């Protein structure tokens, strides 16, 4: 029986598409939901000659991620769910797996971006890495921007 679910979100509408699924099952099954946002480090940029460095503002990015999660958590809590939030920094798949262990999750639920072809080769698949290496079951919801837009049009037409 599942009691704790980890829900990784990246701030995109595609990633958040798994939230309605979680609302539908977490309440009746009394899951504890841990919302996770992983901050992928920005590689430093430097130029030889007059110094130019693009330094990542880690504190600002962490605060932005925490605020995003707080908004989602508030929505879930208003529906009676028990919610925790967690912000981690690092390579997304590795941090999702570590967070699942830390949160003692017995299920990971996440949306995939549905990328294919060259885009998938260039950007990789976090969902695939998580699925391949997770010690707990992984629920994947395939979602694309196009599907989200279609669903939004259907909702507006009602």
Image (tube, helix red, strand yellow):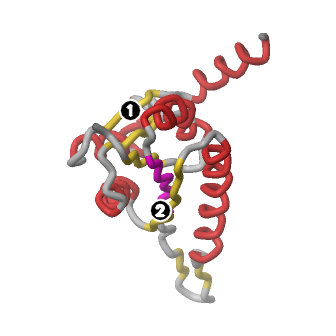
Task: Check disc 2 and report its element: helix, strand or loop.
Answer: loop
Identify which residue is drawn at 57% across, 88% down: 49
Considering the whole magenta stretch, tell me its main secondary structure: strand
Q: Is residue 22 magenta?
A: no
- Residue 7: x and y in percent read 45, 46
Q: Residue at x 61, y 82 (%)?
A: 52
- The residue range painted magenta reads 32-40
Q: Nearer the viewer, mark 2 or mark 1?
A: 1
Question: What is the x, y in percent for residue 25?
Answer: 46, 31
- Which residue reaches farthest top? 158
Which residue bears the numbered disc 1? 140
Dot 2 crowding, Cα within 10 Å, few <14, some 14–19, many 20+: some
| Nearer-the-camera pick, 69 or 79 | 79
At 48% across and 55% down in the image, what residue appears?
36
Indicate whether 148 appears above or below 132: above
For disc 2, the marked residue is 40
């Amino acid at each position: 029986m599942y009691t704790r679910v980890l829900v990784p979100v990246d701030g995109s509408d595609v990633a958040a598409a798994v939230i309605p699924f979680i609302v539908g099952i977490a309440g009746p099954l009394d899951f504890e939901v841990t919302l996770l946002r992983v901050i992928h480090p920005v590689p430093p940029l430097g130029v030889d000659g007059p110094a130019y460095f693009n330094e990542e503002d880690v504190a600002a990015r962490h605060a932005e991620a925490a605020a995003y999660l707080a908004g989602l958590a508030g929505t879930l809590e208003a529906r009676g769910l028990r919610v925790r939030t967690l912000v981690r920094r690092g390579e997304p798949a590795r941090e999702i797996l570590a967070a699942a262990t830390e949160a003692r999750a017995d299920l990971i639920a996440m949306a995939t971006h549905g990328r294919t072809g060259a885009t998938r080769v260039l950007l990789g698949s976090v969902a695939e890495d998580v699925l391949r290496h997770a010690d707990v079951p992984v629920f994947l919801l395939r979602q694309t921007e196009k599907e989200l837009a279609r669903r939004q049009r259907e909702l507006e037409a009602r």
